């Protein structure tokens, strides 16, 4: 299948840069990010690696409230050790993607940009007084939780869907974006739903909730879930006709469609995907502080400015979700 000029070249640049950064676990600071106002004092505040997934997994570990963070910004938390550690270091360490155009990716200057990256800068601005006092660590989808558990990163801001299973392993902020899982296909392919992809290869990232939904599609035969480490590898497979569709969050699909005008996002929402900022489990001081930053970021127009810049052209008008807390 023919390669697609500038779009193909752009993806290759992003993929190569991401691979180099991931190997070195290098740090990069983005630029041109809307600065969020400081919050009031809070108390406490590749195709070569593609594999077929053999069996369905549970999408949750039971009933839970995925929309409600466990601690509100106003909740007093006596132990401030997580926040104090970051302040003493002088840098916020955030796990992010490097190849998800519009949400988190490396630009031509090898700096991180995107909707999630803007949010990381806003937290650094509030916590450390400097939007650029943040070190980005590229994490694969299936490495996000281990990196939080090992304290390799302070936070993960990487289009990470809140679900019951993950809530047993890490903490989450209130929902900062309501995404939905959909499909990306070739224009003219005729595919509009998972039901129409029975027996076909559908690509998604290892460790993602998207893989589980593909495996559980109500069709016989079921689509064949092809797992890759990076979403850009799914784009390679689709361009080379090795898969018939990519299924993941609409925000990520919009970025892929921006890179290749011969692709389109199709079908209704397959599943709600509420995004949260992930924290180490038990870091309630950090979770409360992040929730305070989110509330201020949404109130002062930072969220809207970032959304309008990155998503509005592809996804239309949007507004921040209503914050909910379970405490």
Image: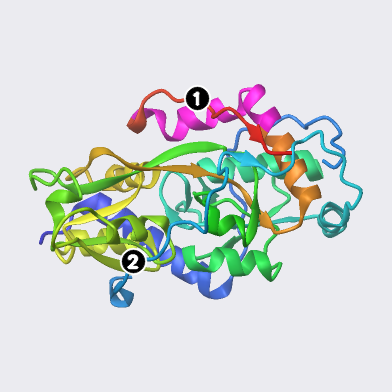
Query: Residue at the spot x=74%, y=42% of the render?
Result: 71
Q: Secondary structure at mark 2?
A: loop
Please tell me whether the stretch drawn in magenta is mainly helix, strand or loop. Answer: helix
Relative to the observer, which residue lies in front, 242 or 17?
Answer: 242
Residue 200 inside the magenta-drawn segment: no
209 vs 54, left or right, is right
Residue 304 picture quarter:
top right
Residue at the image position 52 percent from the left and 51 percent from the top: 163
Residue closest to the eye, 266 or 12:
266
In the rendered image, the vertical position of residue 8 relative to residue 274, given as above or below: below
- Residues shaded magenta: 295-313
Residue 147 place in picture, x, y as percent:
62, 68
Query: At 52% from the left edge and 54% from the top edge, which residue is drawn?
Result: 62
Whether pointer 1 and pointer 2 mark residues with C-beta atoms closer than 8 Å, the reply is no
On whether residue 307 falls in the magenta region, the answer is yes
Left or right placement of residue 180 versus residue 105 in this view: left
Residue 196's label in the rendered image is none
Check residue 56 in the rendering and tell me which mark sits there, or answer none. Answer: 2
Q: In the drawing, does residue 267 fall left or right of residue 157?
A: left
Circle 1 residue: 319
Q: Give how far apart the Cα atoms at labels 1 and 2 are.
A: 34 Å
| Residue 205 drawn at (x, y percent) | 38, 62
Note whether residue 29 is visible: yes
Q: How is the image coloured?
A: rainbow
Asked whether the viewer can see residue 130, the reply is no
Query: x%, y% of residue 139?
Result: 54, 64
Q: Quadrant of the N terminus?
A: bottom left
Q: Is residue 283 above or below residue 289?
A: below
Instruction: Between label 1 and label 2, give the one nearer the viewer.
Output: 2
Placement of the C terminus among the 4 image quadrants: top right
Q: List x then y, in percent, for residue 84.
A: 87, 54
């Amino acid at each position: 299948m023919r390669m697609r000029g500038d779009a193909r070249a752009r993806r290759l640049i992003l993929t190569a840069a991401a691979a180099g950064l991931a190997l070195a676990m290098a740090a990069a600071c983005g630029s041109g990010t809307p600065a969020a106002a400081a919050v009031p004092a809070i108390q406490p505040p590749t195709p070569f690696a593609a594999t077929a997934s053999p069996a369905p997994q549970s999408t949750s570990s039971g009933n839970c409230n995925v929309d409600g963070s466990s601690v509100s910004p106003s909740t007093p938390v006596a132990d401030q050790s997580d926040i104090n550690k970051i302040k003493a270091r002088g840098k916020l360490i955030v796990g992010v993607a490097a190849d998800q155009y519009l949400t988190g990716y490396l630009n031509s200057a090898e700096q991180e940009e995107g909707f999630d990256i803007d949010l990381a800068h806003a937290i650094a601005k509030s916590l450390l007084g400097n939007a650029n006092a943040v070190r980005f660590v590229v994490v694969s989808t299936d490495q996000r939780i281990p990196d939080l558990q090992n304290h390799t990163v302070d936070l993960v801001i990487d289009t990470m869907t809140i679900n019951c299973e993950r809530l047993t392993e890490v903490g989450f902020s209130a929902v900062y974006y309501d995404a939905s899982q959909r499909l990306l296909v070739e224009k003219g392919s005729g595919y509009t739903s998972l039901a129409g992809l029975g027996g076909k290869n559908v690509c998604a990232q290892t460790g993602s909730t998207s893989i589980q939904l593909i495996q559980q599609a109500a069709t016989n035969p079921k689509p064949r879930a092809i797992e890759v480490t990076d979403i850009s590898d799914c784009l390679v497979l689709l361009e080379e006709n090795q898969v018939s569709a990519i299924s993941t969050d609409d925000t990520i699909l919009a970025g892929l469609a921006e890179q290749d005008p011969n692709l389109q996002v199709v079908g209704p929402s397959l599943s709600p995907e509420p995004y949260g900022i992930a924290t180490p489990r038990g870091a309630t001081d950090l979770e409360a502080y992040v929730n305070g930053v989110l509330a201020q970021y949404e109130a002062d127009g930072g969220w809207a400015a970032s959304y309008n810049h990155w998503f509005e052209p592809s996804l239309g008008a949007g507004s921040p979700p209503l914050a909910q807390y379970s405490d």
